[in-house]
Image: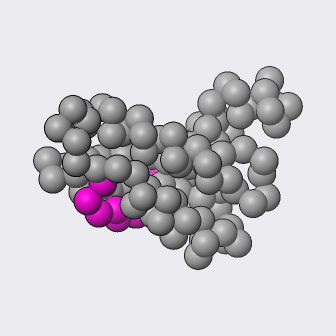
Amino acid sequence: MSAALSHDDLKENIIAVIRTCYDPEIPVNVYDLGLIYGIDIDDENNVRIDMTLTSPNCPSIESLPSEIQNKVQTVEGVKSVKIELVWEPPFHTGMMSDEAKLQLGLM
């Protein structure tokens, strides 16, 4: 890891990579969709991402978490990545960014 890369910079790089992952049924990236509930980075740069899906029956339940894990693992400075699927609070459109709401015609 580069000594100049702070946890904040690393988190921003992680978010940028997550924004390249899209729910296959909705043309919005998963970060702006509000599916990422938390990104925690420990002192050794192990990353834990708490995320949800639009529903527990989402057909992307197998592919989307592993896609995010694989992409985040490529971020310079990341030691390991663990994805935790969480269902509380349940996803709702209020979790979307304003950009995502505009893109989907909800604003």
59 or 17, which is in the foreground? 17
Among all residues in the image, which is located at the extreme right? 105
Report the side of 76 relative to 21 (left or right). left
Q: Residue 60's spot in the image, x, y percent?
A: 66, 69
Among all residues in the image, which is located at the extreme bottom? 62
Where is 65 relative to 46, above or below? below
89 or 60, which is in the foreground? 60
Q: Residue 31's spot in the image, x, y percent?
A: 56, 43
Whether residue 85 is visible here, answered yes or no, is no
Q: Give residue 105's quadrant in the image.
A: top right
What residue do we see at 61% from left, 48% from top? 20
Q: Give residue 56's quadrant in the image.
A: bottom right
Q: Give residue 19's quadrant in the image.
A: top right
83 magenta-colored: yes
Whether residue 57 is visible here, answered yes or no, is yes
What residue do we see at 41% from left, 35% from top? 12
What residue do we see at 77% from left, 51% from top? 26
Q: Residue 3's spot in the image, x, y percent?
A: 17, 38
Report the side of 61 relative to 17 (left or right). right
| Range covered by the magenta-colored residues | 78-88
Report the side of 87 relative to 79 (left or right). right
Quadrant of the snapshot with the C terminus = top right
82 magenta-colored: yes
Report the side of 44 relative to 53 (left or right). left
